[in-house]
Image: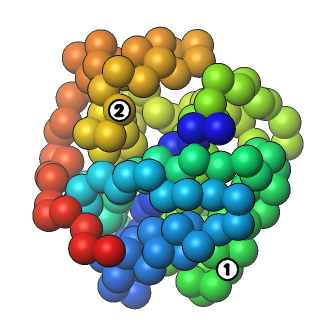
Amino acid sequence: MRVFIGLGSNLENPEQQIKTAVNDMGSLSESKLIACSSLYSSPPMGPQDQPDYINAVIELETTLLPHVLLDELQNIEQQHGRVRKRHWGERTLDLDILVYGDKLLNDKRLIVPHPGVAERAFVLYPLAELALDLVIPILGKVEPLLAHCPMGELRKLGAIKL
Ligand code: ROI
């Protein structure tokens, strides 16, 4: 399956968190890292008294089932010392399954496509960098979604060195 995963961090050297997380995901079983977007910075969505975020999106080709992939991503978050401080608060690493092929999932653990994809510039723009022509279930093609999602204070940083 062609899978897109969103990465976010705003604690403990966010750029490094994102880079190591990309490497970690590149080592997942039954999976191949296909592409990684540039890094982006953006002010926090949610409480404003927290640091800016670094965000990116990767494309993974995997045969891991969605919930198995989710377990693996949560393992990686834990390895990065993720602690949940408050709702919509700061985090060392957040890994979200944005799109899992053409699958629609909605259960206690997982909603796919991720509900924030179309509205959150820090998700949509890095995704568009990788897959402008991607058709997301329910939402449709990525490119037209950009018109409804202002970049705001999202800033594109450099490419990631793997
Ligand atoms: N805000 C930004 N800018 N980037 C994120 O990745 C992010 N992740 C979150 C919340 C707390 C909603 N805000 C965010 O989980």
Relative to 92, 27 lies left or right? right
In the image, which disc is placed on residue 131? Answer: 2
Please state, as top left, top right, bottom left or bottom right, where the C terminus lies in the image: bottom left
> Visible in this render: residue 114?
no
**Mark linked to residue 126:** none
Decide: few, some or many residues near mark 1? Use Cα within 10 Å; few <14, some 14-19, many ≥20. some
Q: How is the image coloured?
A: rainbow
- Give the amino acid at mark 2: Ala
The residue nearer to you, when weighing 102 against 95, is 102
Residue 138 percent across, percent down from the top left: 58, 13
Relative height, residue 155 to residue 24 (above, below): above
Identify residue type, mark 1: Gln
Q: Which residue in the protein does label 1 denote?
A: 78
Residue in front for this viewpoint, 159 or 87: 159
- In the displayed structure, 78 sits above or below 104; it is below
Question: Mark 2: few, some, or many residues within 10 Å (few <14, many ≥20)?
Answer: some
Q: CA distance from mark 2 to mark 1?
A: 29 Å
> Would residue 162 be visible to someone looking at this image?
yes
- 21 on left or right of 65: left
Q: Single out the mark in the foreground, 2 or 1.
A: 2
Residue furthest right as drawn: 108
For marks 2 and 1, the one nearer the N-term is 1
Circle 2 — which element? loop
Residue 64 percent location from the top left of the image:
76, 52
Disc 1, SS: helix
Rendered location of residue 142, percent (x, y): 37, 22
Name the residue rendered at 25%, 68% in the picture. Answer: 160
